[in-house]
Amino acid sequence: MLSRLAGLPRTRALALCALPVAALFAVAGLAPLPYAIAQPGTTADVLGKDQGREVITVSGVPVRPTQGRMLMTTILATGPSTSLDLADVADAWFRTDRAVLPKSSVYPSGKSDEEIEQHNLGQMKESQDAATLAALGYLKLDPKKVKVTLHLADVGGPSAGLLFSLGIVDKIDGDGDGGELTGGRTIAGTGTIEPDGTVGAVGGVSLKTQAAARDGATVFLVPKAECSDAQAEQPEGLRLIPVTTLNDAVSSLRALEQGQESQVPSC
């Protein structure tokens, strides 16, 4: 191969060498790639209603009326069976309102769309159960005597756990002194939660902050480990508060509501 190329005119040799490269790029441009594209998704007020039903319903203890909003945030990703080519990925790569993610980091591998949907709904149910236990544990209430029902349609995954817990706390106890845990603001956030109140990372935070700001939030609660991700595309006017536990989140919101700015951490 080398000896034959050496005898060709330079321009022709270069052209012949370029043909395999051009073919490779043409194939790459058309071949499906193992990525998903995500963008800011919907938000839902856990203190309000979804499809005509209260998102959080509590019985067994007095419940207080709430003001302000608590928005759980989501991302919207291309489906597991969606084929993306190089042009799709390249376009999303350079947009601040899109993220290119390995498909394996978004969806379990080897499962159908239906199986993945059921998996995500199962994660949501586990998250709701953990959120209820965390909130009632924080309030020192017996889960056998207090019933909490959580309703949120068409949303899967575990990342609403923190906001569910905060919504339960606000409906039962407010800021602990007769006031609003939200301070009348629109609070948003994300984070998984364990029954002991530990808050975990979720992914897609920079997109979720955009969804929060779009829908009127001025404060965003973010798992502390994801502060840098949240700051990457931090919308103007949106305050980032890092949390590692439910207690952190409640303490920060109380301090913010009471004007104790020095006690409120920031990313």
Image: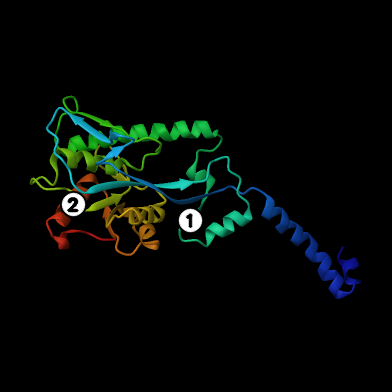
Name the side, left or right, on which 83 lies relative to 42. right
Circles 1, 2 touching at the beta carbon (< 8 Å): no
List the residue tagged with mark 2. Answer: 184
Find residue 153 and report its horizontal and vertical position in percent. Answer: 37, 35
Residue that protrudes farthest toward the front in the picture: 52
**176, 216: nearer the viewer:** 216
Please give the name of the residue rendered at 14% of the width and 44% of the height, measured from the top-left corner: 174
Please give the name of the residue rendered at 27% of the width and 37% of the height, measured from the top-left corner: 131
| Residue 231 image-quadrant placement | bottom left
Indicate which disc residue 98 carries: 1
Please give the name of the residue rendered at 28% of the width and 36% of the height, measured from the top-left corner: 55
Q: Quadrant of the C terminus?
A: bottom left
Q: Quadrant of the N terminus?
A: bottom right
Instruction: Identify the mark nearer the N-term, 1 or 2.
Output: 1
| Residue 6 image-quadrant placement | bottom right
Q: Amino acid at mark 1?
A: Arg
| Residue 206 image-quadrant placement | bottom left
Find residue 178 and report its horizontal and vertical position in percent. Answer: 8, 45
Q: Amino acid at mark 2?
A: Gly
Q: Is residue 256 above or below residue 58?
A: below
Indicate which disc residue 18 carries: none
Name the side, left or right, on which 153 lies relative to 168. right
Check disc 2 and report its element: helix, strand or loop.
loop
Mark pair 1, 2: CA separation: 31 Å
Q: Residues within 10 Å of mark 1 (few under 14, many from 20)?
A: many
Q: Is residue 165 above or below residue 7?
A: above
Q: Choose mark 1 or mark 2, whichever is in front.
A: 2
Name the side, left or right, on which 31 lies relative to 255. right
Check disc 1 and report its element: helix, strand or loop.
loop
Number of labelled discs? 2
Q: Is residue 11 above or below residue 177?
A: below
